[in-house]
Amino acid sequence: MEKEIEKRTQALRDSEEYLASIVATVREGLIVLDSDMRVTGANDHFLRTFRVTKEETIGIPLWELGNRQWDIPKLRELIEDVLPTSNPVENFEVEHDFPRIGKKLMLLNAHRIELEGQYKDRILIALEDITERREIERRKDDFLSIASHELKTPLTTIHGYVQMMNRTVPADASDKFRSFLEKTGAYVSRLNDLILELLDVSRIQSGNIEIHKEPFDFDKAVHEAAEGIRAANSGYTIAVKGKTGVYFNGDESHIVQVINNLLANAIKYSPDNKDVEVILSVLSGYLKVSVTDQGLGISQEDQRKIFDRFYRAGEIQKRYPGMGIGLYICDQIIKNHGGTMWVDSEKGKGSTFNFTLPLTEQMKNEY
């Protein structure tokens, strides 16, 4: 019996040492809280990041660390909810002038530790300094904004001249000249669309994107968008099924932009299958739109990042031109309307892009 106890005790020590070695090598600040929200452990990275000692950290309530930088009502509510509900805190940003290290932006994640014994009822908090990353993103956004605005003016002039040339082509102009002019117009339009997308990204990032909400016939808007894409891609079949029967209170031009982007992607990434399906429905107080293709499909790994700025799936990036901002803009437009966008897909078996938008009580009654 004693040997068995000794064996288990040694196994516990070994596991503790193993876990401690993992924690020590993690490049994030880690602290452990007990049920009273007191710090019971902190790794070396945490101590180095905040330039504190164990004596200044262990046994102290989280809310009293430093100059009470973590004593934020919303954060407090979320963390105190972790143990009773097992709900994690994910990607909570804390911007603060920390003692000894100055103004920083920290990303906080908290999870309940699912262990028994002395580690029961513990919370693991991971802290990542994202100050530099956010500053790089800000500079990138500033550059894109300036570049897009600077390019917009001369491009508008070029676009105007190309249109004027199209209207004044001599009757005896050669087919070669007409072909060159047509291609020039197509490339100028493509560049113009790209710059407009970059300007949209810039407005979204700065919080200056304007939403003009008015009631509009949602089903009619979807059908008209599908008809426009269908006319430009005669080899494809775009079937719109179902209906919402709703006059939706939103920004029609932005919602149509989302529909156009999803349909254009469905066609672009389905070179070998010409069938695209759009399904409209109303579910539990939300209208839902699903756009399905039978194209390349998206891997599980890529699905997690597909709505990120400038992200493009590996295979798509190699085969098709683009900047990876269309879906990001779509996702932000839907979020600005209080909705949600997601994708269901399997590699090689096509994709279904879905979004839902909340209905007001008036819309529900009309439906």
Image (spheres, rainbow, N blue to C red):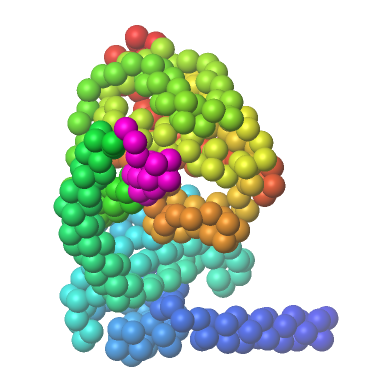
Q: How many marks?
A: 0
Residue placed at 44% from the left, 51% from the top? 307
Q: Is residue 246 above or below residue 312?
A: above
Q: Is residue 33 toward the left or the right of residue 267 in the image? A: left
The quarter holding residue 313 reads: bottom right
Residue placed at 32% from the left, 48% from the top? 188
Q: Which residue occupies the foreground of this view, 99 or 254?
A: 254
The quadrant of the rendering that contains the N terminus is bottom right
Residue placed at 43% from the left, 69% from the top? 125
Q: Is residue 286 above or below residue 121?
A: above
Residues in magenta?
171-187
The quadrant of the rendering that contains the C terminus is top left
Q: Which residue occupies the foreground of this view, 99 or 337?
A: 337
The quarter holding residue 91 reads: bottom left
Residue 18 in view (yes/no): yes
Q: Is residue 252 above or below residue 294?
A: above
* Residue 157 spot, x, y in % from top left: 18, 48
Residue placed at 72% from the left, 83% from the top? 11
* Residue 120 spot, x, y in % from top left: 55, 66
Residue 314 shown in magenta: no
* Residue 193 spot, x, y in % from top left: 33, 46
Q: Is residue 183 toward the left or the right of residue 294 in the image? A: left
